[in-house]
Structures are given as C-alpha cells and as structure tokens.
Amino acid sequence: MKRLTTLIFAAIIAVTLSAPAWAQSTTSPSSQAKTQAKKDAKADKKEAKKKKQADKKAKKDAKKDAKTK
C-alpha cells in the first residue's frame, strides 16, 4: 500500500510540475509559413501594381511621342 501511495503522490507532483509547460503555446511552423506567404503575396501585389502603372505610363508616353512626330 505504501508503494501505491508513493507512486500516486509522485504522479500528482509530476503532473503539477508539467502543467505550466503544457500550457505554453509555441508558434507552429505552419502559422509562420502562412504569415510569410501573406507578406509575399502583398509584396507581389505591390510589384504588379507598379509594373502596371509603368506600362500604362509607357503606353501614354508612346502615344504622346507618336502624335508629336
């Protein structure tokens, strides 16, 4: 009976000491990947917008040059 009581007591202490470690949440790699993907998508959109504006300006300049010649 004394062994059983000691075993139960040890298990309770082990669980009590482990609980704070279990409660801590770590950032999973998948959420980091999602965040990075969002940042990449945002950067790609910015680049696409700049390219579109540059193309539009080039087209406008080309029309302007064609009219002046």
Image: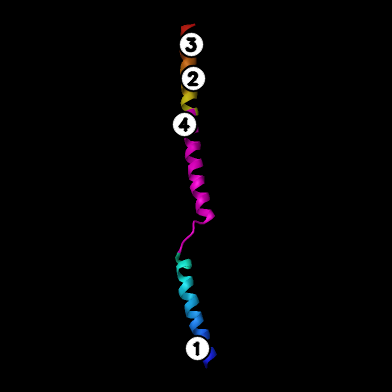
The residue nearer to you, when weighing 23 against 8, is 8
Rendered image: mark on residue 65? 3
Identify the residue position indicated by label 2 in the image: 59
The x, y position of residue 21, in whole percent, is 48, 66
Q: Between tags 1 and 4, which lies in front?
A: 1
Q: From which residue to which does the magenta span run?
A: 24-50
- Residue 46: in magenta span: yes
Earlier in the chain: of badge 2 and badge 3, it is 2
User: Quick check: 34 above or below 64?
Assistant: below
Label 1 – label 2 distance at C-alpha: 86 Å
Label 1 close to label 4 by CB (< 8 Å): no
Can you name the residue that lies furthest to the top here? 69
Q: Residues within 10 Å of mark 2 (few under 14, many from 20)?
A: few
Identify the residue position indicated by label 4 in the image: 49
Label 1 close to label 2 by CB (< 8 Å): no
Mark 1: amino acid:
Thr
Q: Mark 2 falls on what kind of element?
A: helix
Earlier in the chain: of badge 1 and badge 3, it is 1
The x, y position of residue 57, in whole percent, is 46, 21
Image point (50%, 88%), residue name: 5
What is the magenta segment's predominant secondary structure?
A: helix
Label 3 close to label 4 by CB (< 8 Å): no
